[in-house]
Amino acid sequence: MPNRAVVITVSDRCAAGAQRDESGPAIIDALPALESQLVHREIVADDVDAIRDRVTAWLGRAELILLTGGTGVAERDVTPDAIEPLLERRLPGFGEVMRLEAFKRTPLSIVSRSGGGIARKTLIVWLPGSPRGARECVQWLAPAIRHVCGFLRGETPH
């Protein structure tokens, strides 16, 4: 049974219709490698309450929530701030791998606040906002995402 996946793009410009979302579709294209099937996709503005509301709505209803955008250091980059209070378990290795692998070609990747964690039997991963960054991070994390989702569904032994 595939994981039920939600993809949320966090972007003021995309939410306002001023820019086309390319990162969300890049993640959706990678879902088969995660053994996941899209059940919902949306775009929200860079707003803590809006992000938290949309993520909370899917906790326990999907095994996987993937967000893209809002992970930098700009004042409007609030995705980690919105999600971290919801987490029951943080998975620091997710952010560490994303930054380490990206650092090999983009030294400024170390300022990314991308990461992962678990809340109400749902794996939440917040990814960079660039299509290339989001796509590469999903590739690097794919084995861990499959493992954690299987564990949350009770299919992967401890």
Image (cartoon, grey):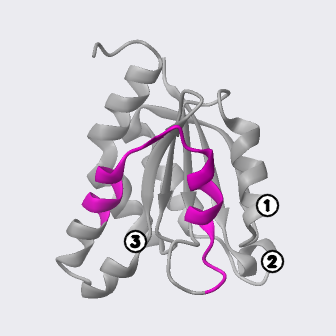
State whether the magenta stretch is mostly helix, strand or loop.
Answer: helix
Ranked by sequence position, the earlier of labels 2 and 3 is 2
| Residue mark closest to the camera, 1 vs 2 | 1
Rendered residue at 53%/37% (across/down): 88
Q: Residue 70, relative to residue 3: is it above or below? A: below
Q: Tell me the number on the disc at residue 49.
A: 1
Where residue 81 appears, as percent x and y from the top left, is: 60, 64
- Separation (CA) of disc 2 from disc 3: 21 Å
Q: Residues within 10 Å of mark 2 (few under 14, many from 20)?
A: few
Amino acid identity at mark 3: Arg
Where residue 111 appears, as percent x and y from the top left, is: 38, 81
Give the left or right position of residue 80, taking residue 56 as reference. left
- Separation (CA) of disc 1 from disc 2: 20 Å
Residue, disc 2: 17
Residue 63 magenta: no
Residue, disc 3: 132
Where residue 64 appears, as percent x and y from the top left, is: 53, 37
Ranked by sequence position, the earlier of labels 1 and 2 is 2
Verify CB contact (< 8 Å) between mark 1 and mark 3: no
Q: Residue 124, relative to residue 58: is it above or below? A: below
**Which residues are drawn in magenta?**
75-98
Give the left or right position of residue 106, taking residue 137 as reference. left
Q: Secondary structure at mark 3?
A: helix
Rendered residue at 38%/12% (across/down): 155
Amino acid identity at mark 2: Gly
